[in-house]
Image (tube, helix red, strand yellow):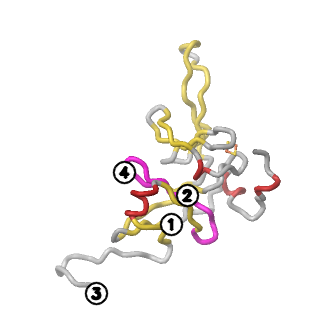
Amino acid sequence: MGQGHANSKPEEVDESMVLVGSEEDFKKSKRIKATVNDREVVIFYHEGKYHALDLRCYHSGGPLHLGEIEDCNGQTCIICPWHKYTIALGTGEGLYQGKDPENPTAKKWYSKGVKQRVHKVTIRNGGVYVTLSDTSIRYDSDYYASEKFDEKTCVK
Ligand code: FES
């Protein structure tokens, strides 16, 4: 047991949590690429929040760590640098703009559902940890996180 009050519990780190950097690192760099249990992920630190996702875009494997962050109808999104797909950082949903049937001259945001796998981020004692999400549910980005994906053969 650690030191401290009888009622205070030390903050625990379980074996599913992989250290990807310190809070200081993220304050400086805002985004970090990491390999967590053989899976490439990117962790963004944006407006005080952490978001971890599969690094390779669900569309065709684009490198999301090189994308721009934008606000899309109130959701923080990453724009893939290859074909500009829009992915919500908080949920992994693929978002797109289409016609608004109620207002034909305006556009409206729609969701394609969750396409990009997101992972859990935990802060412990100044360290930033990622826990991979449950892979029993499949998402489109899983293909590009597997060894089947070869960046040299894909269309950019
Ligand atoms: Fe990301 Fe095509 S690879 S938009």
Determine whether, in the image, residue 1 is placed left or right of residue 36.
Answer: left
According to the picture, the residue beneath numbered tag 1 turns out to be 131
User: What's the amino acid at mark 4?
Assistant: Gly
Q: Which residues are magenta?
A: 36-51
Cα distance between the residues tagged 1 and 4: 19 Å
> Circle 2 sits on which residue?
42
Q: Is residue 91 left or right of residue 25?
A: right
State the image coordinates of residue 53 (x, y, percent, origin top left).
55, 55
Label 4 Cα crowd, 10 Å radius (few <14 / some 14-19 / many 20+): few
Say which mark, if any, is on residue 48.
4
SS of the residue under disc 3: loop
Label 3, label 4: how many angstroms apart (C-alpha)?
31 Å
Disc 3 residue type?
Met
Direction from residue 142 to residue 78 in the image, left or right = left
- Closer mark to the observer between disc 3 and disc 4: 4
**Can you tell me which quadrant of the image ligand 1 is in?**
top right
